[in-house]
Amino acid sequence: MPRGEPSLDPAVVDQAIHWTVRLRFNQADEHTQRTFEHWLQLRPEHAVAWQRVSALGDDFAGIPTQLARRTLRGTRHGMRRRESLKLLGLLATVGGAAWLGRDYTPLAAMLAQQHSSTGEQRRFQLDDGSQIQLNSDSAVDSDFDAQRRLIILRRGEIIVNVGADAQAAQPRPFWVQTRDGIVQANSPRLLARERDDGTLLAVQGGSAAVFPGGSQHLTDSASSILTRNQVLFSSSGAREFRDNGLDVWGWSAGVISARNMRLKDFIGELSRYRLGVMRCADEVAERRVSGTFQLADLDQVLALVAQSLRLRIDYRTRYWVTVTAANLA
């Protein structure tokens, strides 16, 4: 468990697994939603456990549906701790196919040295003077030795302000390791973000050397990026990142800043900062959003966007939000 985080009752973790499987693999009717919301608000530990387990969502998607339904049937009669651990182990195995081995399983992110909860941005400083900022639902480890400084992005998104390493005889190289490869920072400020299609890398000042695929490819030529450029890289290589209208640095100032951004993409970004489900109807997906909005009040952001784009915001529950076209009749 990360330092400073309370341990969770195994029974509460089991319940969170039950709800994550149930909501993902079954149509949630109103009774199910009300029951889930009641459980979520019953104890603060429930929300924490659900956040941690539901963060495995992409890996739940890789489980065969029949297996998931059998697991769900088991949870209705109470999932034993051993069965819960088997499911988490399966998730780690399934997810490992898309990640770079055991160091990038969801469990590794849950046990990281530093992490942020959904909707939270955190800052901390390392011994070399480097400052790390974590975006919503992110996790990192640090591993420094006499030869190099290494930050391991376990999940989510970080901004690194590289320290001067004044205590060392000479500044050690600074590396950032992700599931898709390794980056050597020759820049004072660097951003790395996990995406479904790879890792986004951006720098401000200086440059960075990208080694797609990880340490086994450090002898290969690197892809260098210049000041303020952005690249997207995976284990197979790096390519220019196509801007979708989002200011990728905005969250570090507590805002989401969009320029002619598709509403579907904008809602997808907002969903990173809110527990639960946010959905955008196809009928309004291509409407465009421009502006700078405070992440501290997502309900206000939705209200402002709804007013300017003639949208309807439905809160089926606090954790289930749907964006559709407004009925002007």
Image: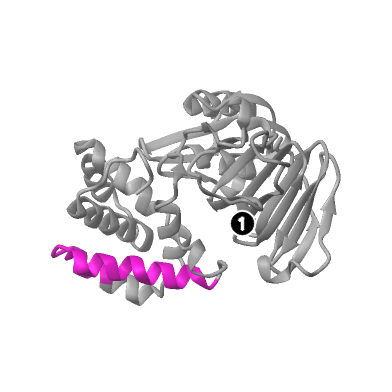
Q: Is residue 290 above or below residue 240?
A: above
Highlighted range, magenta? 71-97
Q: Amino acid at mark 1?
A: Thr
Is residue 284 at all visible to an observer of this figure? no
Residue 6 sits in quarter: top left
Q: Is residue 152 above or below residue 128?
A: below
Residue 310 x/y as whole percent: 60, 29
Residue 283 x/y as whole percent: 60, 46
Q: Is residue 185 above or below residue 130?
A: below
Residue sitting nearer the eye, 296 or 265: 296
**Outermost residue toward the right?**
226
In the rendered image, which residue does mark 1 sit on? 178
Left or right: 123, with 202 as reference point: left
Image label count: 1
Is residue 297 at all visible to an observer of this figure? yes
Left or right: 112, with 156 as reference point: left
> Is residue 88 in the magenta section?
yes
Identify the residue shown where x is 68% and y is 39%. 287
Identify the residue shown where x is 41% and y is 64%. 60
Residue 260 sits in quarter: top right
Near mark 1 (Cα within 10 A), the count class, few <14, some 14-19 or many ≥20, is: many
Residue 121 x/y as whole percent: 51, 33
Residue 103 x/y as whole percent: 50, 63
**Outermost residue toward the front?**
169
Left or right: 232, with 110 as reference point: right
